[in-house]
Amino acid sequence: MLDMVLGLPEQMAEAAARSRGVKLGRPVKRGPVMVAGMGGSAIGADLARGLFWDEVPVSITTLRDYRAPAALDRSGLFVAVSYSGNTEETVTAFRDAVRARSRVVCITSGGTLAAQAARHGIPVVPVPGGLPPRAAVGHLFVSLLVTLERLGFCRSYDRDLAEAVGLAAERRAAWHRRAARLAGRLLDRLPLVYSTSRLLDPVADRWRCQLNENAKVMCHTSYLPEHNHNEIVGMGAPGLLAERSVVVGLLDRDTNPRTALRWRHLLAVTRGGYRQALALESEGRFRLARLVSLLMLGDLVSCELARLRGVDPLPVNRIDELKRRMARSRRQA
Ligand code: F6R
C-alpha cells in the first residue's frame, strides 16, 4: 500500500495520458454533473467539486446510493465510477441513468459496469485493474477531470497537473518522514480532521476513509466554518474523548482569513476538549497541487499508522464480507 501511495504522481501522469485516448463523443452542453460511486470510487468526484469550487461554474453532485434523486437532470452528464465495476449501488444507479436517457460515461476497470456500458454503446474510460480501489485515486480522479475537460465542462488542467505531479514526486520522501511523525501523534487517539475550505473538504474525507481502511481506526471529520456553529459545543464530551482526541486542521493559503481566525479562536475556546491540535498547511502554487499535497500526506499517515498498529493496510475484510453477504442474498432473491 505504501508503494502505491508513493506512486501517486506517476499514477496521475499516466491517467492523464491514457484518458485522452478514449472516444467520448460530442461535448455536452454545460449542465449539472452527477457522479455515482461508492468509497474509493466516489472520492474523485468530491475532489473535482473541491477543485472547481471557486473557478469552474459547474455543479457536481456525488451520488452514493442505489437510486438517482428526483433532481437528476438529463441536460447534464451522468458519470458512473466503480473501480471493480461490480459495486451494486453504482451499477443500479447507472441503469437508472440509462433508462432516463441521460448522457452517460463510465470510469471502471471492467466488471458488470463495463459489460453493460458496452451493451448500451456507452463510452468507458478504462483504468488499469489489480489495485485496491482506494489506491487507484490518481487514476479515478484524473480520468474524471480529463473527461470533464474533453466534454466541455472545464478548461484544461494540464498545467496544474504538471505542477501537482512534479511537487508530489519531489516532496514525497519528506512527506513520508512527516507522516511517520504524525502517525505517532495519532496512535491510540481519535483523529478529528477539520477542513477549513471547500477545496480541502474532500481531502478531510479522504483522510477519514484512508485511516478507516488502511490503519483500521475510527476517524471523525468536520468542516469550518460550519463546525463553529454546532460541533464546537460538543467537543470534549463524553469526557474520555477529551483525553483521546487529536484535532488535525487542514489549512490552505486560500482559506478565508476569517475562517483562519476562527480556527485559532476555536482551539482556544475548546481548550481541554481535545488532547492536542496539529495544523497542516497545503503546499504548492495551483489549487490542484495544494489539494494533492495534503491528500498524499494523509494517505502516507494512514500507512504509517497501520505500521505502528501492526496491521496490514491492504485487506479490508469487513467490506469484502459485507459485499459477499449482499451478493448471496441477491442470488437467493
Ligand atoms: C476499497 C475501497 C472501497 C471501494 C468501494 C466501492 O479499496 O476503497 O471503498 O472503493 O467498496 O468499490 P468499487 O470502487 O470497486 O466500486
Image (spheres, rainbow, N blue to C red):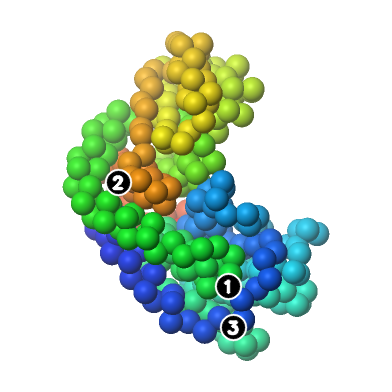
Which numbered disc, 1 or 2, marks the residue closer to the eye?
1
Report which residue position mark 2 lands on: 300
The residue at the point 49 percent across, 15 percent down is 265
Alpha carbons under labels 3 and 1: distance apart: 8 Å
- The mark that comes first in sequence, 3 or 2, is 3
For label 1, the residue is 151
Report, in whole angstroms, how far the alpha carbon at label 1 lies from the one at label 2: 33 Å
Q: Is residue 220 visible?
A: no
Q: Amino acid at mark 2?
A: Leu
Percent position of residue 105, x then y: 59, 75
- Which residue appears at 51% of the width and 63% of the height? 155
Observer-nearest of 41 and 88: 41
Q: Is residue 110 above or below residue 59?
A: below
**Dot 3 alpha-carbon crowd within 10 angstroms: few under 14, some 14 to 19, many 20 or more:** few
Task: Name the secondary structure under disc 1.
Answer: loop
Check whether the beta carbons of the residues at disc 3 and disc 2 lie within 8 A of each other.
no
> How many numbered marks, from 0 up?
3
Measuring 36% from the left and 67% from the top, which residue is drawn there?
A: 131
Disc 3 on helix, strand or loop? loop
The amino acid sitting under disc 1 is Leu
Labelled disc at residue 25: 3
